[in-house]
Image (cartoon, rainbow, N blue to C red):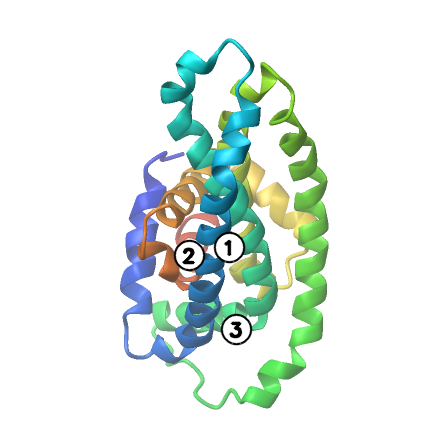
Amino acid sequence: MNPFIGPIYAAKGLNLIMRPSLRRFVIIPLLVNFSLFIAAIWLGLHYFDSYMAQAIPAGYEWIEWLLWPIFAIAMLLITFYCFTLVANLICAPFNSLLSEAVEKELKGIAPDSSTSLLETLKEIPKSLWAELKKMGYFLSRALPLLLLFFIPGVNLIAPFLWLIFSAWLLASEYLDYPMGNRNIAFTDQRKVLKQHRITSLSWGGSVMFLTMIPFVNFIVMPLAVAGATALYLDKLDKD
């Protein structure tokens, strides 16, 4: 129930991915995340001005200076949300390997150096199917939230709802890796997160905050996988 647990495990995740024994598991997620975030930043900046002109109702232009940072953050989150789903879809097999290696590291077992590229490739269809099912679940909830941005008046609270949703999404996304490695079904994973709602939102909110920091957001994916694995082992695992 510690609301400040997220930053603690974000720092722990950073420490973990810097360890020599884990660096080789970080390379591919790092490269994919770097490429996609560059694209996300460019698209977010490109379309932001036109959205702002349409989002603020006529007669309320005077509050633009107040709403600008809120809408800016919301637009970045929406863009990063989409690219996070794509990045995790591409990197799911490699993120699972990283999570497994982090667990072995934390338990004092050397990560398996015999894992071959062929073995990783064999896991891709299974990982892609699992990610696609998660994506469908998230999109079915994200799309109604997105519609709120286009309803005058209601769109003033839409960014705050999106902040909460994004924190929950990121918690679900990254805690899936240690739980998925234990063959815990996605429906059961959601039950675990609901039992630890404050902890999950604190963790997801911390990851979300890191995605908005320039240059730091390039390493968010491997950091979040490592931090989520440590968090699950320490606080959520009942075994």
Decide which of 178, 92 is in the foreground and name it. Answer: 92
Residue drawn 34% across the image and 42% down it = 5
Q: Secondary structure at mark 3?
A: helix
Contact, mark 1 vs mark 2 (Cβ under 8 Å): yes
Q: Secondary structure at mark 1?
A: helix
Closer to the chain start, of discs 2 and 3, is 3
Q: Secondary structure at mark 2?
A: helix
Residue tagged 1: 174
Q: Which mark is residue 231?
A: none
Identify the residue at the far top of this view.
59
Residue tagged 2: 224
Decide which of 12, 44 is in the foreground and name it. Answer: 44
Q: Position of residue 214 (x, y in %)?
A: 32, 52
| Marks 1/2: CA–CA distance | 6 Å
Residue drawn 48% across the image and 68% down it = 32
Residue tagged 3: 94
